[in-house]
Image (spheres, rainbow, N blue to C red):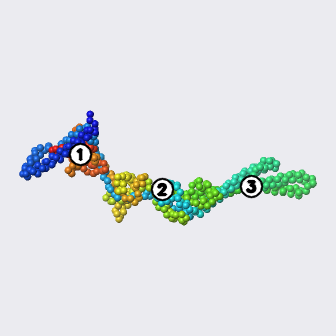
Amino acid sequence: MRSPLVRRCGIVVVFAGLLCAAAWWYGNASSEANSTPPESRAEADNDVATATQADPASSEPEAIEFPQEMWEPAGLRVQTVQSGTIADTVELTGKITLNEDRLAHVFPLVEGRVEDVRVQFGQRVRKGDLLLVVQSREVGQGMLQLHQDRLKLAFARTKQKWIEEVRRNTATLIEMMRAGASIDEIETALKDRTMGEYREKLTTAYVALQTAEAHLKRLAPLSPSGAVPARQVLEAESSLNAARATLLSLLEQVPQDTLQALRLAEQAVQELETSIAIAETNLKILGFDSEDIASIDPAKQGEALAHYPVTAPFDGTVISKDVVLMERVAPDRQILTIADLSSVWVTADIYESHLPLLARLSNQTVRLRCNAFPDKRFEARIFYTGDVVQESTRTVALRAIAANDEGLLKPGMFVTVELPSLDETSVLKVPLSAIQDHEGKSFVFVQTGDESFTRQDVTLGRRTLEFVEVRSGLEQDDRVVVAGGFALKSRMLADLLEE
């Protein structure tokens, strides 16, 4: 059995022979026709016309036989005609612009002097990268004030704990005094407890009361016998009442004093905590993170406390730079522009004649072409179709976003935007590879048998990059040649030359 290569070479040789023979025949026929008298040529033409009118079937295209074993070497492939949609495209001139959702105009949030510049024009940066450092008095003062407030807060909390302990111990002392405990019992139970000045006040008043009671008890039995004057007994009773009143007053006043002192200590702690929270929040607003704020140490950091870092807000490219070393900057002056070029916007203007498309274009994908890369096709997703018609141009703005991972689409570049018509009308369509042309006519090869094909002239309509609409000449489910049609066309031309 012959190999496919041998069969293919045989086919090529046969076609070449047929074309040469046809050329030789055509040359002889032309010579004979030129040597024939005009009267004879006219008679011959009349004979051909008469023969054609007598045999209408002779105008029908003849079947082309093509054995199946030759299909694979010739690359011949057959496909059934199907119906589908053909999307007309509306081409607009668009422009690539920066993605404004990924564009940052960098301003320093503080006033100061530029201490260090870490980036250059055109440099790519990552989110959080340090761009420059500003020496700021505002930042330095905020850091130092925060450090001082933290020291005060530590002292205030210590004082609050001491007052709480004093209040608890004082309350215990008061309970023992109300219960009538002796001085020795009180001293034994509370000698190591912190009470501050309240220990002396309460103990002195308590001892004075006990002394007054003992003195009155000693004098009272002697008064009836006249050994002690009545006046002295009255004085002892007065001293006892005064001591009792003093102690009762202290027993009521000391809890209130300790409570008030505790409340003042708590208030001082809360005020310092609030001040610290505000200072930390202000520093976080300026861009400092929690670690930087927690590690403030003037002794170690020195003037570096006043350094304000400016960092990149996202991954991007520095597309403008207006800052140099030792320059003064302020919050109202732009110093850098960073753009994320991994995606870009496509802007185009749609004319009023195409406005009916807008309602159906939202979130649709459009194709882009540009002269810089003629062999590449880009895609963009429409996210805005305009709401206002510009009076001067009578157009509506269209915006789409396109991925630009390779960086081929440059802002400022002009592109051709292909808008789909979104026509859902079903038509007969065939691949563009199925269409053949001869003598200004378009046709396809229709399979009429297992190994036979017939030329079928067609009328074409709209076309895309892959398919073309067939308006007449074919029916649905017809089987047409979509690949390898050159072999059939060569054989058809050879048959025509033989005729």
Contact, mark 2 vs mark 1 (Cβ under 8 Å): no
Mark nearer the N terminus (2 vs 1): 2
Q: Where is residue 408 drawn, in percent x and y? A: 40, 55
**Distance between mark 3 and mark 2 Cα atoms:** 70 Å
Q: Nearer the viewer, mark 3 or mark 1?
A: 1
Amino acid of disc 2: Arg
Image: 409 above or below 474: below
Which image quarter holds the N terminus? top left
* Residue under label 1: 444
Task: Name the spot of residue 490 as percent of width and height, x first.
Answer: 22, 45
Query: Could you tell me which residue is drawn at 84 percent across and 53 percent down?
Result: 211
Answer yes or no: do the residues labelled 3 and 2 have beta carbons within 8 Å? no
Q: Which quadrant: the C terminus?
A: top left
Label 2, label 1: how far apart the Cα atoms are? 55 Å
Q: Residue 272: in sight, yes or no?
A: no
- Image coords of residue 245 (percent x, y): 79, 56
Choose the circle earlier in sequence order: 3 or 2: 2
Question: Which secondary structure, mark 2?
Answer: strand
In three-dimensional space, the C-alpha distance between marks 3 and 1, rounded to whole angstroms, equals 113 Å
Q: Is residue 2 above or below residue 440?
A: above
| Residue position marked by numbered label 3 in the rendering | 254
Q: Amino acid under label 3? A: Val
Discs 2/1, front: 2
